[in-house]
Amino acid sequence: MIIRSDMGSNKKKIFVAVVCGPTASGKTSLGIGLAKNTDGEIISADSMQIYRGMEIASAKPTKEEMDGVKHHLMDFLPPTRPFSVADYVELARRCIEDIHGRGKLPIIVGGTGLYISSLINNIKFDDTGSDPEFRENMRKFAEKEGNAALWEKLREVDPEAAERLHPNNLNRVIRALEVFHLSGETISRSAELSRREETPYSACFIMPDYDREELYDRINRRVDIMLEKGLVKEAEEFFTHTDYVTAAQAIGYKELKAYIDGEKDLSECTEKLKQATRNYAKRQLTWFNRTEGLNRVKIDKDTDEEKILKIAENLVKRYSFF
């Protein structure tokens, strides 16, 4: 059992390892290798891997790839079910307590930065009420003017929140606007105030760090492999259900819809998918590069995987005994 006592504080904190970073950077395999070598269990921090039936689009690890390592918060919700950051934090906290209580190392693995930072920083979510009429008006505005126009509204009042949110993440954009509408306080300011309560966790952040060109090559190759595995068929089955609102934000489905509808050819949609994934990776890098104490593990195409794992393992050992 790993417990870390932070310098300057007598309060003991639960030590967790966090393997984070952009898509296609090798987080999954690194996290699994780390778990095997440190007697750990993995808690997924991926906003799409939580949904059932989205194996290819979310790059969900197979049973063989998991290699006997126990994974939590993965493949447990139907795509019709909304799932908030607050929901994630609550469930992840329970997982950490359970794993830690059994004497094992909790390892957070994923690329959803908001999930990770909210959990590790012990964010307390706002108790601001709701205004259904306001939300409906914002939704109608987005339908008429476009998601980007609504996102611009948010950028005017809360540029920090806008920077974190994609314009197509409509529910969260509307919620950020709703908080400002009801309280006169930005959701970013609310989050800042919520950080005043000390976190119960001590974390070692590890990010596989590729040269940008190499990362983009990995992304392009991953998209090709996804298509070979049957991404188009998975997307076709997905779009037979019109009520899959939240999970429809997944990169990999919406870019292929024009092909499925017979409006564009597959090569054009594939290029759009690769570009969308590269743009997403760029946003992930922007987010994680702001993480305090981030350990970047430099990697190139010739770097041996065992060497990467050894570096990560040494970092975990060093941080756990600070």
Image (spheres, rainbow, N blue to C red):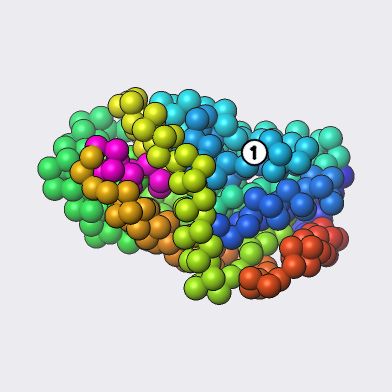
Q: Residue at x 62, y 42 (%)?
A: 61
Question: In the displayed structure, does residue 94 sit left or right of residue 184?
Answer: right
Outermost residue on the left side: it is: 144
Q: Where's residue 41, x and y in %?
A: 75, 41
Question: Is residue 145 in sight in this rendering?
Answer: yes
Residue in view at x 84 percent, y 51 percent: 37
Q: Which residue position is annotated with label 1?
A: 62
Where 108 falls versus 205 (above or below)?
above
Residue 258 is one of the magenta-drawn residues? yes
Q: Position of residue 285 (x, y in %)?
A: 50, 65
Residue that appears at 58% across and 41% down: 60
Pointer 1 local density, CA inside 10 Å: few below 14, some 14–19, many at least 20? few
Give the quadrant of residue 305. bottom right
Amino acid at pointer 1: Thr
Give above or below for 241 relative to 11: above
Do we see residue 124 in this rendering?
Answer: no
Q: Position of residue 114 (x, y in %)?
A: 50, 51
Find out whether residue 277 is within the magenta segment.
Answer: no
Q: Secondary structure at mark 1?
A: loop
Residue visible at 51% across and 59% down in the picture: 221
As rendered, which of 264 and 95 lies closer to the eye? 264
- Say whether residue 237 is left or right of residue 95: left
Q: Main secondary structure of the magenta part?
A: helix
Q: Which residues are magenta?
A: 251-261
Image coords of residue 67 (percent x, y): 76, 41
Which quarter of the rendered picture does the N terminus lie within? top right
